[in-house]
Amino acid sequence: MSAVQFHPANGRQRECLRKAYHGVRVAAVAASVFGAAPAHADEWDDCNNFAVNDKVVAGCSAVIEHNTRPQPDIVKAYVNRSGANARRSSYDQALADAESALKLDPRSVGALLQRATALRVKGRTDEAMADYDKVLEIDPKNPNAYALRGSIRMARRELAQAIADFDQSIALRSDFASTHEARGRAHMLNGEIDKAIADFDRAIGINSNYPNVFFYRGQAYRRKGDLDHAISDLTRAVAVNPRNFVAFIERGDIYSSKGDYARAIADFNSALAIAPSKPACASAELGD
């Protein structure tokens, strides 16, 4: 079968080619305008997929680079990428992203919280406190800002102010195990052991697998003199986190005080196996 030949004088062929060319042009323009939309949609989905940090970084980076979405979305992309970088312990990048977001929107609560997180890790706690204060000026009912500001105050042993911040946070959101645990620690540092245990109980009621809450409640029971409950909680603490060497040391100390030296030595050896260079382990009483 011979190939179809094009004849310039053939009007029907010219019209068919004209229509075909017009169709190709429309398709090309549509592809340039709309064709990338599915990919952009995927990038936006990845940017908001907090379960996978690498996807968040890649998706948000594409959103920022393309710069085709509304400005609030670009701000959110910087904030989300900042959070993903913080979760990956890339705090310089997290800080830079939060700063970029704040250049676009100085009142972005998410950006202020992310910047405060990075600043805090870098030891710039005064600046972090200023960001939490600003968040609460913009959003006075933000439970996260109260809780995070309270944690800095607790680290500074400003216990009354810390507890007040935790109270405010819990009044706004009572279902955060982390805030109950934090307030319990502040009460314990303040010598209010029963209040501490009550808060640890609430944290466990919300999330029984929350890291370290059994450890802290075990410490509280030990300070109260309830050694059996302390041992029980410290045992659960090492079950939740088998690398919590301090829990082994705490439990070993209790066993030693009860004259159960075999179990004490076993716990001290477990702590030493996990963290041989820690001073607390180096000074622990070890078996032969």
Image (cartoon, rainbow, N blue to C red):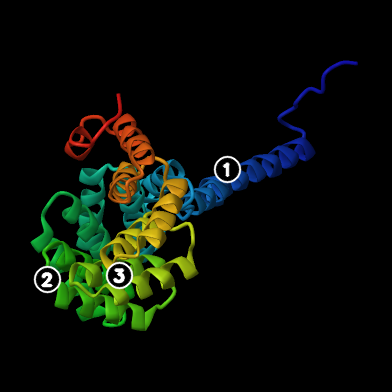
- Dot 1: element: helix
Q: Is residue 215 left or right of residue 185?
A: right
Question: Of the residues tagged 2 and 1, which is closer to the observer?
Answer: 2
- Circle 1 packing at 10 Å, graded few (<14), some (14-19), many (20+), is few
What kind of residue is marked 3?
A: Gly
What kind of residue is marked 1?
A: Ala
Q: Residue at x 23, y 73 (%)?
A: 135
- Residue annotated with mark 2: 158
The answer to whether residue 264 is above or below residue 163 is above
Q: Quadrant of residue 165?
A: bottom left
x and y percent of residue 13 in the render? 76, 36
**Which label number is shown at residue 184?**
3
x and y percent of residue 84 in the render? 36, 49
Question: Of the residues tagged 3 and 2, which is closer to the observer?
Answer: 3
| Image quarter hosting the C terminus | top left
Q: Residue at x 74, y 32 (%)?
A: 9
Q: Is residue 194 left or right of residue 133?
A: right
Q: Residue at x 23, y 69 (%)?
A: 186
